[in-house]
Image (cartoon, rainbow, N blue to C red):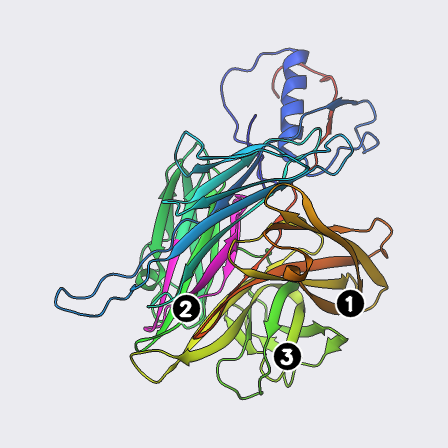
């Protein structure tokens, strides 16, 4: 069964001989519809009244999980300083759930395979409705493949987590496994002297992929010193050191477009202050440029407007027209004013950070509206205690990418972390808080395949709630959210997962987005051609 084609990319066309028959034309029409249609085809579309609907099997689901962290270069031979005194603890966790219809009472089966390898190293076998698998210390990126559950696309999610408790890379760097795509926007990172930023591109497909790299900084689009085109072999990975091609950019946005196949990518972002680590995380793709961006998972501690190391909201208008962006922060009690920054003027091409200092402690969802398309992400911080080499306090940072409300229903939970669900209700109109209350069913999945807990959650439009997952069960492997079918029209659920590890010198954390559900193509229209041949 072939892997699914993502984000509406046109199928590759073999330009060989064409058999001039009605049968061949029908087969070609069927194939094109399976690849390109993002939703069940309708027989009553214009020009399709004479078509016959043919049932087709849903495609296999493929996810790519980030590989191990890229370690900093060792010091000089006579140096007693080790930048990585503690080895990273890297894990990959994956989970599948039942399909959306009654024809899929159990979860999808699947496997975990190292990128580029032919043999699976861990199975996904459902037992009581869900399947889970775990892998310790992978030597490369991991590919999760899941077969359809009945007549539905597989619902699968995965997560890579890397815990480093000391040294330059101190932090919890975790990211949800990605559905490969051809157009990726990564909002986050820096190439200042004190920062490192490595762009990692993975190709889980069977053909080479030519990737075009674009970078924006505080003063506009960056003229790259090489590296604008990267060729990634099938089953291969390429690492691009961003400081080498876009040096001294305090704020980064990276855009990747792939030709020849789909890719997954992330930026490994880390910061040092002298000898003191100031956070490591993985910047992952967010929503494509749009006039509205929604960023979940902004969980902040108490701060002042002019305090050090506040959370920030990063924005970019990649087009040529300036815009005034309006920022709405949705908190536990509804809309919360952002001190001095509810509206901000954005110059085209300039990457801007909006400080979120002064917000009361709590969980928030940022809704950014503008008259022209923009991209967005948020970074949250946690201060720590000073390290052993100087008096500078450590810092932990985590990036939260923008997402598509209502687009995902499942997230994998990394082992060894404490998880908190950040759940918001966002109205589609000009006012994201205008609308009724939405209801969602929250299911907590365990490592043995069962549902540990299930509860109904109500969230008023324009508000964000924080739920402690640990209070609902132990040994959690996944979180599933199912919005009620009778929710108010135009009000959608936006959610993410905050995962933390508490250490003696401070809290380490990451923000995870749910994995978007697969395209639900169950029928395609097929009709006889009215003529033979070409032209």
Q: Earlier in the sequence, mark 2 or mark 1?
A: 2
Q: Where is 217 relative to 211, above or below?
A: below
Q: Nearer the viewer, mark 2 or mark 1?
A: 2
Q: Cα distance, mark 3 to mark 2?
A: 26 Å
Q: Earlier in the sequence, mark 3 or mark 2?
A: 2
Q: Residues within 10 Å of mark 3 (few under 14, many from 20)?
A: few
* Residue 175 image point, x, y percent: 51, 55
Q: Where is 530 relative to 489, above or below?
A: above
Q: Which residue is mark 3?
A: 361
- Give the structural element (helix, strand or loop) at label 2: loop
Q: Which residue is mark 1?
A: 430
Magenta-span inclusion, residue 260: no
Residue appearing at x 41%, y 39% in the figure? 115
Q: Nearer the viewer, mark 1 or mark 3?
A: 3
Q: Where is 106 relative to 386, above or below?
A: above
* Residue 217 image point, x, y percent: 44, 69
Which image quarter: residue 198?
bottom left
Q: Which residue is mark 2?
A: 190
* Residue 444 image point, x, y percent: 67, 51
Is residue 529 found left or right of 202 in the rendered image?
A: right
Magenta-span inclusion, residue 184: yes
User: Magenta segment range?
Assistant: 171-199
Residue appearing at x 42%, y 29% in the figure? 119
- Give the structural element (helix, strand or loop) at label 3: loop
* Residue 366 image point, x, y percent: 66, 69
In what quadrant of the picture does the C terminus appear?
A: top right
283 vs 183, nearest the viewer:
283
């Amino acid at each position: 069964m072939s892997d699914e084609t993502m984000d509406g990319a046109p199928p590759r066309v073999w330009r060989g001989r064409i058999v001039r028959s009605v049968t061949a034309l029908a087969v070609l029409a069927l194939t094109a519809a399976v690849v390109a249609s993002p939703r069940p085809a309708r027989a009553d579309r214009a020009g399709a009244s004479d078509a016959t609907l043919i049932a087709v099997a849903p495609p296999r689901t493929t996810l790519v999980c980030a590989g191990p962290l890229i370690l900093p270069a060792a010091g000089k031979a006579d140096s007693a300083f080790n930048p990585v005194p503690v080895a990273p603890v890297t894990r990959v966790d994956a989970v599948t759930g039942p399909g959306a219809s009654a024809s899929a009472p159990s979860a999808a089966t699947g496997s975990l395979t190292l990128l580029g390898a032919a043999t699976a190293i861990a199975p996904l076998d459902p037992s009581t409705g869900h399947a889970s698998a775990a892998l310790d210390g992978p030597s490369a990126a991991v590919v999760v493949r899941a077969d359809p559950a009945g007549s539905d696309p597989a619902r699968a999610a995965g997560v890579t987590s890397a815990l480093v408790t000391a040294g330059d890379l101190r932090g919890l760097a975790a990211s949800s496994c990605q559905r490969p795509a051809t157009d990726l926007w990564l909002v986050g990172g820096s190439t200042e002297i004190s920062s490192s930023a490595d762009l990692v591109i993975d190709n889980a497909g069977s053909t080479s992929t030519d990737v075009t790299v674009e970078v924006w900084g505080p003063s506009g689009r960056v003229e790259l010193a090489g590296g604008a085109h990267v060729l990634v072999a099938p089953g291969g990975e390429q690492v691009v050191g961003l400081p080498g091609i876009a040096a001294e950019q305090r704020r980064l946005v990276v855009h990747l477009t792939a030709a020849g196949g789909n890719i997954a990518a992330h930026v490994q972002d880390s910061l040092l202050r002298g000898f003191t680590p100031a956070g490591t995380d993985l910047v992952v793709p967010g929503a494509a440029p749009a006039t509205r961006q929604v960023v979940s998972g902004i969980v902040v501690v108490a701060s002042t407007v002019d305090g050090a190391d506040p959370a920030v909201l990063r924005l970019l208008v990649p087009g040529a027209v300036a815009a005034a962006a309006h920022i709405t922060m949705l908190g536990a009690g509804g809309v919360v004013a952002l001190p001095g920054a509810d509206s901000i003027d954005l110059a085209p091409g300039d990457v801007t950070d909006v400080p979120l200092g002064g917000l009361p402690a709590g969980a928030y969802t940022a809704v950014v509206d503008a008259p022209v398309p923009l991209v967005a992400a948020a970074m949250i911080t946690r201060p720590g205690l000073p390290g052993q080499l100087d008096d500078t306090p450590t810092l932990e940072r985590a990036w939260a990418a923008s997402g598509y409300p209502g687009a995902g229903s499942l997230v994998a939970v990394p082992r060894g972390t404490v998880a908190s669900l950040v759940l918001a209700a966002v109205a589609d109109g000009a006012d994201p808080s205008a609308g009724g209350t939405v209801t969602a069913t929250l299911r907590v999945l365990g490592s043995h395949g069962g549902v540990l807990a299930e509860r109904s959650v109500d969230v008023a439009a324009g508000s964000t709630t924080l739920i402690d997952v640990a209070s609902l069960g132990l040994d959690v492997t996944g979180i599933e959210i199912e919005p009620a079918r009778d929710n108010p029209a135009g009000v959608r659920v936006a959610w993410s997962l905050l995962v933390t590890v508490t250490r003696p010198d401070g809290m380490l954390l990451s923000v995870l987005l749910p994995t978007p559900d697969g395209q639900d193509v169950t029928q395609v229209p097929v009709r006889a051609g009215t003529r033979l041949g070409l032209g």
